[in-house]
């Protein structure tokens, strides 16, 4: 039984993870941490992580950037592996996370979905076959109308996977409206759609002469990211110090 500390337990993602763990007999939430303590959980909840004395194998974090400094200090002090899912970290926090990984196992990924990370692996294999045959690469991502950034971090990560497979030959094109010119071979076009309550959709298009190959991933709820975080925690528990990501979780399957 893998025991987890859920950092940000009373947020939306924390509560989804709580539900997932309750139905999985291989994991158990030993304690939670959250400033808001107005939700009844089946485990003790601490408003300050420094006060959390629960025995656990790994921490899952879905909180906010303001809580990450204390989290990193706690992980280091207790030598407890950390699945870090909070986004929007400062450069200093990213550097602190890298320093922590020299002492503790840390898993941090642009997207926690198992499907997206499997797709990333498939794209690298496809690119090595299709790009030399003259196929162009385009990415279209769709998200809800309240998303602030564009393109999505996941779209950029998928583009990076293709680019890495091809030896970093590509530049990314986000807008073609300012120029009237033919598409360059060494570009990946990335388009963003915002509307309604779309959770997340990514389509990667390999367009060749007389044939098109497409890969698509659709997230119907944020539960896909929670499920990925739980699988990451199972993977990370007991691992040696180092920086890991979801690709490592996929490769072990």
Image (cartoon, rainbow, N blue to C red):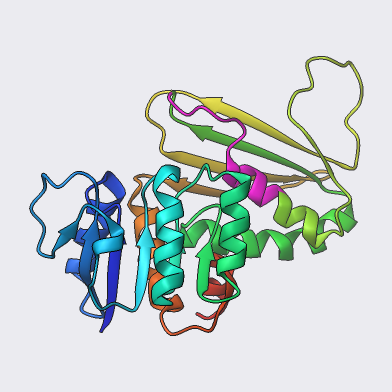
Identified at 55% across, 79% down, the residue is 241
As for residue 149 lying within the magenta part, the answer is yes
Identified at 30% across, 50% down, the residue is 13
Q: Nearer the viewer, residue 245 or 190?
A: 245
Residue segment shown in magenta = 146-159
> For residue 28, what is the image quadrant?
bottom left
Q: Nearer the viewer, residue 86 or 170?
A: 86
Q: Is residue 169 visible?
A: yes
Total labels drawn:
0
Q: Nearer the viewer, residue 225 or 67?
A: 67
Left/right placement of residue 235 relative to residue 203 reads: left
Picture quarter with the N terminus: bottom left
**Where residue 75 sits in the image (x, y, percent)?**
42, 68
As for residue 245 lying within the magenta part, the answer is no
Relative to residue 136, is residue 175 depicted above or below? above
**Where residue 24 sits in the image (x, y, percent)?**
22, 73
Relative to residue 86, is residue 244 depicted above or below? below
Q: Is residue 203 visible?
A: no
Relative to residue 124, is residue 111 depicted above or below? above
Identified at 36% across, 73% down, the residue is 58
Left/right placement of residue 45 relative to residue 85 reads: left
**Where residue 246 sits in the image (x, y, percent)?**
53, 66
**Where residue 23 sits in the image (x, y, percent)?**
18, 69
Relative to residue 148, is residue 207 depicted above or below? below
> For residue 102, what is the image quadrant?
bottom right
């Amino acid at each position: 039984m893998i025991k987890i500390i859920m950092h940000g337990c009373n947020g939306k993602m924390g509560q989804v993870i709580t539900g997932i763990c309750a139905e999985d007999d291989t994991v158990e939430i030993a304690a939670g941490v959250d400033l808001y303590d107005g939700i009844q959980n089946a485990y003790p909840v601490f408003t300050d992580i420094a006060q959390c004395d629960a025995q656990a194998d790994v921490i899952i974090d879905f909180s906010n950037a303001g809580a990450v400094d204390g989290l990193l200090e706690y992980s280091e002090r207790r030598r407890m592996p950390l699945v870090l899912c909070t986004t929007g970290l400062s450069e200093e926090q990213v550097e602190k996370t890298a320093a922590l990984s020299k002492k503790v196992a840390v898993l941090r990924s642009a997207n926690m979905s198992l499907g997206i990370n499997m797709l990333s692996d498939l794209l690298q294999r496809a690119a090595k076959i299709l790009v030399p045959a003259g196929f162009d690469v385009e990415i279209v991502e769709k998200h809800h109308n309240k998303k602030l950034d564009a393109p999505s971090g996941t779209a950029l990560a998928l583009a990076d996977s293709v680019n890495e497979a091809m030896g970093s030959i590509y530049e990314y094109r986000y807008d073609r409206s300012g120029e009237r010119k033919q598409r360059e071979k060494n570009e990946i076009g990335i388009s963003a759609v915002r509307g309604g309550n779309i959770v997340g959709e990514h389509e990667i298009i390999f367009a060749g002469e007389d044939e098109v190959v497409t890969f698509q991933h659709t997230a119907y709820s944020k539960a896909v990211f929670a499920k990925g975080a739980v699988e990451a925690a199972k993977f990370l528990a007991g691992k040696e110090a180092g920086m890991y990501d979801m690709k490592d979780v996929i490769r072990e399957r």
